[in-house]
Image (spheres, rainbow, N blue to C red):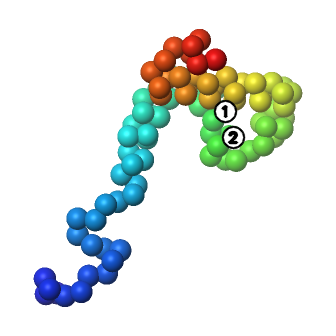
Amino acid sequence: DSIEAAVDAGHEMGGIDARLELVEDWVTFTRICRDLSRQDRQLLQWRFVDDLTQQEIADRLGISQMQVSRRIAALLARLRSAAEGTPAAEAA
């Protein structure tokens, strides 16, 4: 094609890819997840990837839904503080 030919707006050369904003978040998330136990990673997968309810997770683990809720809340607080670079005790 000619360099002067019309270019589809979605394929402009030098355009900004909105997904680039996610790269830093993904790198941070990957880094902080390395420190998680296998059980914590499984819990995150079931809840946020497999989209299981807290009750479904509780049934799998043989614990109460409230215990699952507390585990997820504590885990997310740890991840948040790690991402922000603050100690978990300060984030709570």
Q: Give yes or no for contact between labels 2 and 1 (Cβ–Cβ under 8 Å).
A: yes
Return the residue at label 1.
43
Secondary element under disc 2, as helix, strand or loop, is helix
Query: Which residue ends up furthest to the right in the rendered image?
Result: 64
Q: Which residue type does callout 1 highlight?
A: Leu
Residue located beneath label 2 in the image: 47
Residue nearest the viewer, comparing 27 with 45: 27
Q: Quadrant of the N terminus?
A: bottom left
**Image point (40%, 55%), residue name:** 19
| Amino acid type assigned to the residue bearing label 2 in the image | Arg
Farthest residue toward the top? 89
Which residue is depicted at the point 58% across and 22% down?
78
The total number of labels drawn is: 2
| Vertical position of residue 74 compared to residue 43: above or below | above
Picture coordinates of residue 32 (x, y %)?
47, 27
Residue 69 visible: yes
Q: Secondary structure at mark 1?
A: helix
Left or right of 34 in this view: 16: left
Q: Is residue 52 left or right of residue 23?
A: right
Instruction: Judge whether residue 62 can be spotted in this image.
Output: no
Q: CA distance from mark 2 to mark 1?
A: 6 Å
Identify the residue shown where x is 84% and y is 27%.
Answer: 66
Task: Give me the disc on residue 14.
Answer: none
Residue 13 image offset from top left, x and y in percent:
23, 69
Is residue 67 found left or right of 8 in the rendered image? right
Residue furthest toward the left? Answer: 3
Say which quadrant the C terminus sits in.
top right
Percent coordinates x, y for residue 24 in the rendering: 38, 40
Residue at image location 31% in from the left, 60% down from the top: 16
